[in-house]
Amino acid sequence: MRIDPLPISGAWLCTPVVHDDSRGRFLEWLRIDLLAAATGRTFTVLQANHSLSARGVVRGIHLSDVSPGQAKLVYCSGGAVLDVVVDVRVGSPTFGVVESVMLDAAEPRAVFVAEGLGHGFCALTEEASVTYLVSSVYDPAAERIVSPFDPELAVPWPAGLDITVSPKDAEAPSLTAAAAAGLLPTYEDCVARYRDLAAG
């Protein structure tokens, strides 16, 4: 498995070695030891989520309040999605930066998203099956949402799709409004959390 940092600190792209033969396909989409070596931190899975989305469904931009926050390893096991990481950490050198990655079951990859980063995706195929391994159990009181259609972020959602979102996502505040309301984590708090999770 190759694990490469994305331009936003705290996000990595994980590319497994795929073994295809007459029986089908085999791959390891998570190696805790390799992830720890590449990221310099531990990732303890406390919950596993799975979503099935129709073409054009947008989920996000979601995160969990820090601390403890919620790290995610996101993998598309069926269909394809445009996966998006957004730096919503107030005070971060890349605050407001958006990084998008294609996750496609035909060419398997996963994205690791550290605590305090926003995450979302758009389903590109008739059905898209996405599994998330997360580091904390869901706490509705800690859930934070930023509008996936905030013009300031200009997330590059694909054109020509009939977009569907949940009412919560449709009503979510802009990045600026969420920051002004004190809803977003600070970069300082996130870095302190990452230090706590340092591997070794």
Image: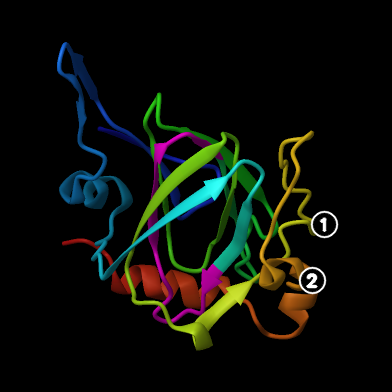
- Residue at the disc numbered 2: 176
Q: Which mark identifies residue 193? A: none
- Report the colour scheme: rainbow
Give the mark nearest the N terminus, 2 or 1: 1
Residue range of the region highlighted in magenta in the rendering: 63-81
Given residues 76 and 154, the one toward you in this image is 76
Indicate whether 169 appears above or below 74: below
Residue 102: where, in percent of width, then height?
Answer: 53, 34
Q: Quadrant of the C terminus?
A: bottom left
Indicate whether 128 appears above or below 140: above
Q: For the residue marked with disc 2, what is the amino acid? A: Thr
Q: Quadrant of the N terminus?
A: top left
Residue ID at (24%, 62%): 42
In the rendered image, which quarter is residue 25 located in?
top left
Residue ID at (49%, 41%): 128
Image side of residue 71 versus residue 63, left or right: left
Residue ID at (62%, 41%): 55
Q: Secondary structure at mark 1?
A: loop
* Separation of marks 2 and 1 at Cα, in angstroms: 8 Å
Asked whether disc 2 touches disc 1, contact meaning CB atoms under 8 Å apart, the reply is yes
Residue 146 visible in the displayed image:
no
- Residue at the disc numbered 1: 152
